[in-house]
């Protein structure tokens, strides 16, 4: 008699769990969907309120005042290319997706990283989990997100948040662990409460490393948002998918160059912020 081994594939474990979540937490997921959609819609409405030339001028002026003329020219060139390529709306949709994803990734990763920096045992527990999260291919995160939230921008946001958390969490932990011990002791000796020591001593000293983590989170989120065009996230990812599925090389090339422009702009903005960050005490 032939013995058959039980089916212990990941799908046989995850599928019942996702079915249970869909049946018992539908109201919660519906609320999350409404909140994310409303946030994205509000941000896109703000970004698309002005004509392209007006928004480009405002961004270039802000960069000129805060970060210098080189970055101002770069911002105008990158955004101008998106407008001239006929991808203005798609580009701003992608930027909105990135902003929301990065904001939520940082909101989750920062307190967890600070907690890990304070407690080595927590860091030891987090480390293998983060290793697994950074080893899993990014498109794998889309599968459970789509199964729970269906197609659209919400699963793209959820998957992007999860994908962007590990680098920010690791570098947050590293940033606070690298704060010189004499600065901590100085704050304690002066009788500063924990909150004051955190915001006035530790946070300024950790800012350069935190901005490196923010830079990595932004770039990884951009890569994931583009990939999420496969599940109906819209933006430049949808344009790349359209060019690929319809074999329209021009559409795919224009969208790809617009993605490069957005990545270059966001990278330079975060790096400039790093150079202008306050030096440790």
Image (cartoon, grey):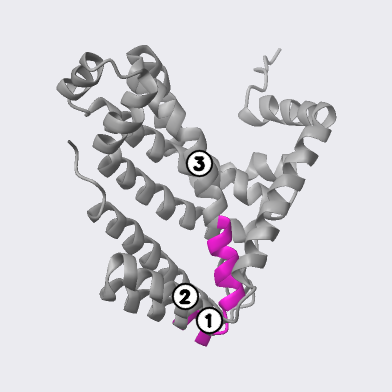
Q: Residue at x 78, y 39 (%)?
A: 31
Q: Are marks 2 and 1 in contact (CB under 8 Å)?
A: yes
Left or right of residue 40, residue 178 in this image: left
Q: Position of residue 185 (x, y in %)?
A: 20, 17
Q: Is residue 239 visible?
A: no
Instruction: Name the residue beneath numbered marker 2.
Output: 58
Give the alpha-carbon distance from disc 2 to disc 1, as whole Å.
Answer: 6 Å
* Residue indicated by mark 1: 54
Mark 1 element type: helix
The main secondary structure of the magenta stretch is helix
Q: Report crowding for label 3: few under 14, some 14 to 19, many 20 or more residues within 10 A (C-alpha).
A: many
Residue beneath disc 3: 105
Q: Is residue 158 visible?
A: yes
91 is within the stretch colored magenta: yes
Q: Position of residue 30 (x, y in %)?
A: 80, 40
Q: Nearer the viewer, residue 281 or 258?
A: 281
Residue found at x 35% / y 31%: 199
Q: Which mark is residue 225?
A: none
Residue 247 is covered by the magenta coloring: no
Rendered residue at 67%/24% (across/down): 13
**Residues drawn in magenta:** 81-97
Quadrant housing residue 69:
bottom left
Q: Position of residue 160 (x, y in %)?
A: 54, 47
Residue in view at x 34 percent, y 56 percent: 270
Tell me residue 108's x, y (percent).
Answer: 51, 34
**Callouts 3 and 1 close, C-beta under 8 Å:** no
Among numbered discs 3 and 1, the one appearing first in the sequence: 1
Crowd band around label 1 with a 10 angstrom C-alpha radius: few (<14), some (14–19), many (20+): few
Secondary structure at badge 2 equals helix
**Circle 2 crowding by C-alpha within 10 Å: few under 14, some 14–19, many from 20:** few
């Amino acid at each position: 008699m032939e013995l058959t081994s039980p089916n212990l594939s990941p799908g046989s474990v995850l599928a019942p769990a996702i079915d249970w979540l869909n049946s018992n937490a539908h109201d919660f997921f519906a609320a999350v969907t409404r909140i994310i959609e409303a946030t994205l819609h509000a941000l896109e409405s703000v970004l698309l309120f002005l004509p392209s030339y007006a928004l480009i001028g405002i961004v270039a002026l802000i960069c000129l005042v805060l970060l210098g003329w080189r970055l101002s020219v770069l911002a105008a060139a990158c955004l101008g290319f998106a407008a001239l390529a006929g991808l203005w709306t798609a580009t701003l949709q992608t930027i909105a997706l990135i902003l929301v994803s990065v904001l939520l990734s940082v909101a989750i990763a920062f307190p967890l990283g600070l907690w890990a920096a304070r407690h080595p045992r927590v860091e030891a527990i987090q480390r293998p989990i983060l290793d697994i999260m950074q080893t899993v291919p990014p498109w794998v995160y889309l599968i459970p997100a789509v199964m729970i939230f269906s197609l659209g921008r919400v699963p793209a946001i959820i998957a992007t948040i999860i994908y962007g958390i590990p680098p920010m969490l690791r570098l947050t932990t590293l940033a606070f662990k690298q704060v010189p011990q004499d600065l901590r002791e100085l704050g304690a000796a002066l009788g500063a409460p924990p909150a004051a020591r955190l915001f006035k001593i530790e946070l300024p000293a950790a800012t350069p490393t935190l901005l490196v983590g923010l830079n990595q989170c932004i770039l990884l989120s951009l890569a994931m948002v583009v990939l999420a065009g496969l599940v109906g996230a819209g933006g430049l990812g949808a344009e790349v998918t359209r060019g690929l599925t319809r074999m329209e090389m021009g559409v795919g090339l224009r969208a790809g160059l617009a993605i490069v422009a957005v990545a270059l702009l966001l990278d330079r903005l975060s790096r400039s912020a790093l150079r202008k960050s306050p030096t440790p005490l």
